[in-house]
Each structure stands twice: as structure tokens, then as C-alpha cells.
Image (cartoon, coloured by chain):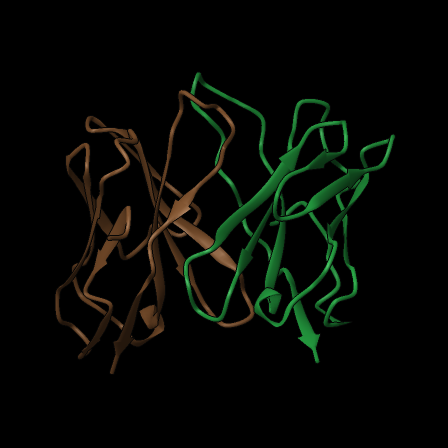
Amino acid sequence: DADVTQTPRNRITKTGKRIMLECSQTKGHDRMYWYRQDPGLGLRLIYYSFDVKDINKGEISDGYSVSRQAQAKFSLSLESAIPNQTALYFCATSDPERNTGELFFGEGSRLTVL
Amino acid sequence: DAKTTQPPSMDCAEGRAANLPCNHSTISGNEYVYWYRQIHSQGPQYIIHGLKNNETNEMASLIITEDRKSSTLILPHATLRDTAVYYCIVRPPLYGGSQGNLIFGKGTKLSVKP
């Protein structure tokens, strides 16, 4: 089983719908991240959380919100999806105790907004 | 914006060494250089990182110039499975007591050919 699990893996929705992408991890890491990937643009950071009570905006947080329900769970929400939020979304974790900055990624959630 | 510059694409013959360059001329003294790769649309995978000295692990070697303004990732015997996008990342310095976050650029698409 994967250490970082994202659900759903694929989702097609319509403009204006509310969408939630979920991430759970079994690595025991405090730090979790949501990235977005668009073709030719690399990965861009949406939100990150250094522990359950800590939420921080990344480069492109507009139109998104997050919830850190527990150490192991970090959800990304699109309150009213729009077509330019069509992208591949990745959740990641890191271990601050190691202080190496290494990220562990999930397999991605592909979202299409029509 | 990413603090690194990489060629958009490279080819390598199977069994030969793949040398992927990265320029990071504005790197700060306490910033690490990280390499990740992404195979097709899977989650990025950590390869290696370093500060000043050259590093080697089971996957690759990292050569950092003495002035730290550039580095090279070496895959000693490339296989078809090494075909991927390779990201060179400079980790932002620590600030506010929190760990800086990895910012991905566009990377180099490495194609390993038979």
C-alpha cells in the first residue's frame, strides 16, 4: 500500500460544483502539502501545513481551501470549481525531524472541470 | 519563480551515463540543491540532495561546482525506466522557524533511447 494516498484519482466535474480532494498518509509526518501541476509548468504549491493547527498559503491559494483533520489527513477543497482549475493535483509529506526537505508524494488526482 | 535553469530536454543512449546540468547562480550559502524526477504523471520521486560536497547514492551522483552556482546529476548507466522529467530545486532558506518549501520549475525531460 502507498504511504501517501490520494482520492479520488480521477474526477470530472462541472463549473460551479464543490470538489474535495483527500489525502491520507501512513508515514507519521507532521508536514503535508498540496501541489498543482499544469502541462509545462512544473509543480506549484497551493497550501501547506506544518502540523494540525498550522495552515499556510502557498503560491497559488486563490480559489482553494484546505482542512487538516488529523496528522494523517489533509484535504483540498474547490468551493466553486472553474475550468482553469483543471490540473493534476499532488499531495506530499515531509519529516521535519530529518530536516532534509525531502518530500514524499502521492500518486496524484487528476481533476477536469468542464 | 524557480531559482534554477535546466535545459528543457535531453536524450541519452541506454547503458550510457546521463549527465543533467542545472544552473543556480543565485544560490545562497545555506541552500541545498535537490533533484527529483517524475515518471510520466506519477508523483515526483526524490533522487538526491547536497550542499557543497559531491554526493552519491544507489540512484545517482550529484556533482556541485566549487562556487555552487551549478550542479550535474549523473545517472551512471541509464535505462529505459529512467525516462522522466528531472527537476533541480534549490531549497529556500529556513525562515520564521519553519522549514522552507521546495519550489519546482519546469525540469528537463530525459529520454533514454535503446
Near-viewer residue (B81 or B105)? B81
User: In screen coordinates, is B77 left or right of A30?
Assistant: right
Question: Which of the chains is green?
Answer: B
Q: At 67% across and 45% down in the image, what residue appears?
A: B3
Near-viewer residue (A77 or A9)? A9
Which of the 4 quarters of the picture holds residue A112?
A: bottom left
Whether residue B16 is visible, yes or no, is yes
User: In screen coordinates, is A111 left or right of B47?
Assistant: left
Residue A75's x, y, as percent?
19, 49
Residue B68's x, y, as percent?
80, 33
Question: Which of the chains is brown?
Answer: A
Q: Residue furthest right?
A: B66
Q: At 58% across and 32% down in the image, what residue appears?
A: B92
Q: Residue furthest bottom?
A: A114
Residue B75's x, y, as percent?
71, 55
Q: Image quadrant for the C terminus of chain A?
A: bottom left
User: In screen coordinates, is B57 left or right of A108?
Assistant: right
Near-viewer residue (A80 or A10)? A10
Residue A57's x, y, as percent?
35, 40
Whether residue B33 is visible, yes or no, is no
Which of the 4 quarters of the picture holds residue A71?
A: top left
The answer to whether residue A78 is above or below residue B27 is: below
The answer to whether residue A58 is above or below residue A64 is: above
The answer to whether residue A17 is above or below residue A101 is: below
User: In screen coordinates, is A77 left or right of B15?
Assistant: left
Q: At 58% across and 35% down in the image, what residue appears?
A: B91
Number of callouts in the render? Answer: 0
The answer to whether residue A16 is above or below residue B28 is: below
